[in-house]
Image (cartoon, rainbow, N blue to C red):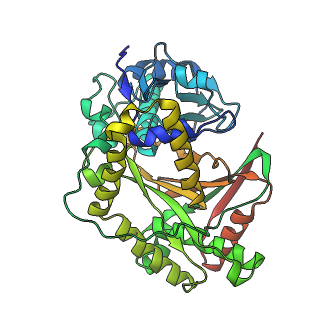
């Protein structure tokens, strides 16, 4: 296997510095199949594709000045699912920072965010699934690359291994995006000893007309529903003067914007916000505000300027020679400050497209984020075969956000299904 050391990218650094014994920033992607998973075939499929994903089936190590990753030294072993998003220990990350598991009819991957982002994870899961079905069902798919499935016969491309943040150069001045930094709403429910997962699922053909009626995307509609629900929660609990700004963290996949195909982290973020004390709180007003903020945040020149600023800090000559333990303290502080600046993350991985020869074996895909390190909620969204799955995870007893969202969906006459599950 390739022993090349690769310096961690700009996003990966903060996830390494922020992890501890009780929490690490990992996320789960899974595909539910129509038939029971054969673990022996899944192990063979993982063996076959390991060399194709040297930055995902990878280990992370600590140097004197920086973190670096490299391909694993031994093939990872598939395991039966026992836990949801169990924190990764230092020893596990140094062996392999990606888990491959199975349950009755599901293939599951859990990825430490320093290794890759949601898009990279989806490409890995789709490629693993194809290899599994090729071995089990003898399927064939032409032009794999058009489906974001990587061929195990190919060697990794340099463009897949590249840290693309370093390539971003701001060509023009950006607009000044004002951001509220104080008095941000945070969920403060007492942490529980288990994880609660609530899945809202929607027929896209039924929810899309609602988004169209407001002339916005599904992401804007769902983000607005979550923001409005948090506003409603505050109004039920406190006076108007005590209510805080509702601010959400939305990761943005940069690959299509900048025409890249790296399998390493290549995301940035926008933080749409609503101040209940300064703005109208009618749902249509919230949608309009969030739509405008997202349009502004997604402008290429604005993204370029913000990314370039982050990379310049990393490339600063003084920063480069600071020992890693000191860097970790700064990164840890930056992470805590960033977490306090928003209520929760809403990560929409978009639509998973699959070739016809694979569709008959698949029920659905899921994306589950870990909770935050200090607050109880996060939200992962993914769509497949005209159904959108929105997963809320929490580690507190009361389903205050889920209940308010269900109430608002009913008010908006949006049809949905809901499933809940506890993980101990």
| Residue 112 visible, this angle | no
Identify which residue is drawn at 71% across, 73% down: 233
Q: Identify the image quadrant of residue 176.
A: bottom left
Q: Residue furthest left?
A: 171
Against 214, residue 185 (above or below) is above
State the residue in front, 306 or 95.
Answer: 306
Residue 384, position in %: x, y?
A: 48, 51
Identify which residue is drawn at 31% across, 63% down: 302
Residue 71, position in %: x, y?
A: 41, 20
State the residue in front, 236 or 419.
Answer: 236
State the residue in front, 329 or 418.
Answer: 329
Residue 332, position in %: x, y?
A: 56, 43
Identify which residue is drawn at 47% across, 69% down: 179
Q: Is residue 274 left or right of residue 229?
A: left
| Residue 378 visible, this angle | yes
Q: Is residue 168 left or right of residue 366?
A: left
């Amino acid at each position: 296997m390739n022993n090349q050391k690769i310096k961690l990218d700009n996003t990966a650094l903060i996830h390494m510095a922020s992890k501890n014994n009780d929490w690490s920033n990992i996320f789960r992607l899974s595909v539910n199949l129509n038939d029971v998973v054969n673990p022996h075939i899944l192990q063979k499929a993982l063996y076959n594709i390991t060399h194709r994903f040297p930055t995902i089936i990878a280990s992370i190590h600590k140097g004197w000045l920086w973190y670096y990753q490299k391909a694993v030294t031994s093939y990872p072993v598939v395991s039966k699912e026992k836990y949801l998003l169990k924190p990764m220990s230092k020893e596990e990350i140094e062996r392999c920072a990606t888990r491959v598991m199975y349950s009755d009819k599901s293939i599951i991957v859990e990825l430490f965010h320093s290794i890759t982002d949601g898009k990279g994870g989806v490409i890995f899961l789709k490629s693993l699934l194809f290899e599994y079905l090729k071995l089990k069902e003898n399927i064939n798919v032409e032009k794999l690359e058009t489906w974001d499935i990587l061929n195990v016969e190919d060697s990794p491309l340099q463009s897949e291994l590249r840290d693309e943040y370093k390539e971003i150069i701001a060509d023009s001045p950006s607009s000044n995006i004002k951001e509220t930094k104080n008095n941000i709403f945070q969920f403060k429910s007492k942490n529980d000893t288990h994880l609660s997962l609530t899945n809202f699922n929607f027929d896209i053909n039924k929810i899309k007309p609602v988004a169209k009626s407001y002339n916005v995307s599904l992401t804007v509609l769902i983000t607005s529903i979550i923001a409005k629900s948090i506003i409603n929660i505050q109004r039920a609990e406190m006076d108007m003067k005590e209510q805080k700004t509702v601010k959400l963290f939305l990761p943005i996949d940069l690959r299509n914007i900048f025409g890249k195909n790296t399998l390493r982290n290549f995301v940035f973020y926008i933080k749409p916000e609503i101040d209940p004390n300064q703005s109208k709180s009618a749902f249509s007003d919230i949608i309009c505000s969030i739509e405008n903020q997202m349009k502004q945040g997604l402008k290429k020149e604005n993204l370029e300027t913000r990314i370039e600023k982050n990379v310049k800090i990393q490339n600063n000559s003084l920063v480069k020679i600071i020992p890693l333990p000191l860097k970790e303290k700064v990164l840890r502080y930056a992470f805590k400050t960033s977490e306090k600046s928003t209520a929760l993350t809403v990560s929409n991985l978009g639509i998973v497209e699959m070739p016809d020869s694979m569709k008959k074996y698949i029920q659905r895909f899921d994306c589950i984020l870990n909770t935050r390190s200090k607050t109880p909620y996060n939200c992962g969204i993914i769509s497949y075969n005209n159904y959108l799955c929105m997963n809320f995870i929490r580690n507190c007893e009361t389903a205050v956000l889920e209940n308010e969202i269900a109430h608002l969906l009913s008010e908006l006459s949006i049809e949905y299904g809901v499933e809940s599950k506890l993980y101990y």
